Image: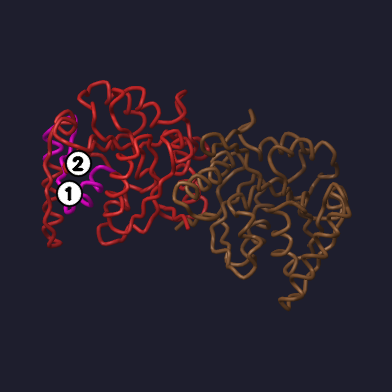
Chain colours: A brown, B red
Amino acid sequence: MKIGIVGGTGDIGEGMAMRLSPLFEVIVGSREKDKAEATCEFGIETLRKRGQECSLTGVSNQTAVDDADIIILAIPYKHLVGTLETLNGFEGKIVISPVNPMEKRDFFTCVPPPEGSAALLIKKLLPPTARICTAFNTIAANRWKLLDEDLAYSVPVCGDDAAAKQQVMGIVNRISKLQAFDAGPLAVSQLVECLTPLLLNIARYNKMKDVGIQFH
Amino acid sequence: MKIGIVGGTGDIGEGMAMRLSPLFEVIVGSREKDKAEATCEFGIETLRKRGQECSLTGVSNQTAVDDADIIILAIPYKHLVGTLETLNGFEGKIVISPVNPMEKRDFFTCVPPPEGSAALLIKKLLPPTARICTAFNTIAANRWKLLDEDLAYSVPVCGDDAAAKQQVMGIVNRISKLQAFDAGPLAVSQLVECLTPLLLNIARYNKMKDVGIQFH
């Protein structure tokens, strides 16, 4: 199983690539292939120093889509539409959205598109056979990168394709101490995408860093 | 400090009364005073059997507002406007909203009023000197009632009045193992009120009971 990270040179994508590549074959996409290659070299070297082997290759975003079975859209919300418009070939693929439509005003708030959520917007933009799930919405970029620290968080996973959702939950459960929870159909992404701005507010007003969430 | 629970004979109010009355002077309000008195008798007896003393008195909703320093609106969202229209005397009082505007369709979803949240609607309905905070939104009725079980949950608290918010956080932190987190101004209630429908979906799709939340 090959996982492609679109926008994989960004803050979140980079940490994801380092956490995922010892477990799965990972290809990191970027608008600039050179940048993706540099991110992968850094990741391979970082993991080598820790005695971890990995499978990590830098490619273009389009190649990340073409060559992967499962695609993670590690794109900031403001670049989501622009990036998806330049890509094709999502037919039949599992597409994971960790995207949160949010803004910082006086406080962090959720600014969903008319479709109701970033995930539902992605559903509208991609071909109908794309198997879209949400996952990883609440894991902060810094946490992905701190490889010495466990990711002891809960991860709500939404999706309308039951088999795809099961596969995504399986991936989540293999990463560090993440625990996947089925949060229902893709439309529940409206609620999931509100979590991160709330966590950012809590971090800010309680002087905490990178607040995460657990359900129990 | 006297705490008045409006709607205190409902599912959540009853459990709250039993958890709060060994710690604070609690008056339970109801549309029917008899019902409030019966709830309190049951609560006092339950606590007595556990060797706990308490201060618990049944009154009308209006008396709960008039006699309390801090008022908890333990009202289902659908009865919120109707109940508040029958009450007055909120001037200068701390008012806690645990209210979640939600509906069960194919799944649980958040259906906020045009004001943006139940808390902001309450702000519109009450006099401007009422010091409104949100708290306890995510603690399930059953959990309040299971007195043998710790409430080991995080409680986001929103509010525009800093002193009122500190006081509410102090109350939260005295109850079982609840931990209060400052979630920012009252407008952040929009995000907080999305949590409970998400938790209900997670409970449903993972066959869990009364899912709660922790931030860390």
**Which quadrant is home to the C terminus of chain A?**
bottom left
Q: Residue B206: which disc? A: none
Q: Residue at x 25, y 47 (%)?
A: B16
Where does the magenta region start and end?
Answer: B12-37
> Which residue in the protein does label 2 denote?
B3
| Residue A138 relative to residue A20: left or right | left
Q: Indicate yes or no whether the magenta region holds residue B34.
A: yes
Front residue of this view, candidates A115 and A143: A143
Which of the 4 image quadrants contains residue B95?
A: top left
Q: Earlier in the sequence, mark 2 or mark 1?
A: 2
Quote the CA–CA distance across marks 2 and 1: 7 Å
**Which quadrant is home to the N terminus of chain A?**
bottom right
> Which residue in the protein does label 1 denote?
B24
Q: Residue at x 46, y 44 (%)?
A: B195
Say few, some or many: other residues with alpha carbon within 10 Å of mark 2 (under 14 / 14 to 19 / 20 or more): many
Q: Position of residue A139 (x, y in %)?
A: 60, 54
Q: Amino acid at mark 2?
A: Ile
Q: Position of residue A181 (x, y in %)?
A: 55, 55
State whether residue B84 is above or below residue B43.
Answer: above
Chain ID for label 1? B
